[in-house]
Amino acid sequence: MKRGPTLVAAAAFIAIVGCAPTAPDLSRPSSSCPAPVGRNGNPIPLLRPTPYYPLAALEQGIEGRVLLEFDISRSGHPVRVEAVAAEPEGVFEEAALEMMSRWRYCPLEDSEPDYPSRIRFALLFNLPDDDLR
């Protein structure tokens, strides 16, 4: 896979397809939602389901990445989600967009400022080890 500097340099976060946590209670305030952003100012996802690996890509041994750009509504839902770059194109974008539709962030209270706008997230699609296939 050819590595493009745009995806690596532009990503504010990097995620590797992994295990998804169980769904927390998304009501505020609660211990599951103590702060909407971390110490570094980045929003903290409460619910982060993993994407599915497209079957055709799995069968063909294709790995790749998708750079997503999105906003977070005050209710904690990703909105205006776009796949702004992908390697290879046309393979993983649908899985990445579907995954992001299921993510959740802390709902914001009236006194809290809005989430940062146009968050970038790079999602890597790596094949499982041979012994796991």
Image: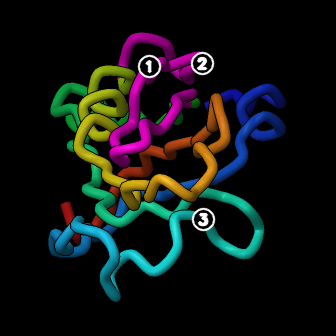
- Crowding around mark 2 (Cα neighbors within 10 Å: few <14, some 14 to 19, many 20+) is some
Q: Mark 1 points at which residue?
A: 80
- How is colour applied across the structure in the image? rainbow
Quick check: marks 3 and 1 in contact, CB under 8 Å?
Answer: no
Q: The residue tagged with tag 3: helix, strand or loop?
A: loop
Q: Residues within 10 Å of mark 1 (few under 14, many from 20)?
A: few
Q: In this view, does 57 lie to the left or right of 59?
A: right
Which quadrant does the C terminus fall into?
A: bottom left
**Mark 3, residue position:** 37
Graded by Cα atoms within 10 Å as few (under 14), some (14 to 19) or many (20 or more), the crowding at tag 3 reads: some
Observer-nearest of 121 and 31: 31
Residue lying at 32% horizontally and 59% vertically, measured from the top left: 48
- Any magenta on residue 4? no
Give residue 27's position: percent from left, percent from top.
22, 67
Kindly report the distance in space between the C-alpha atoms of the residues bearing marks 3 and 1: 20 Å
Label 2 belongs to which residue?
85
**Measured from the top left, where is residue 15 in percent x and y?**
52, 56
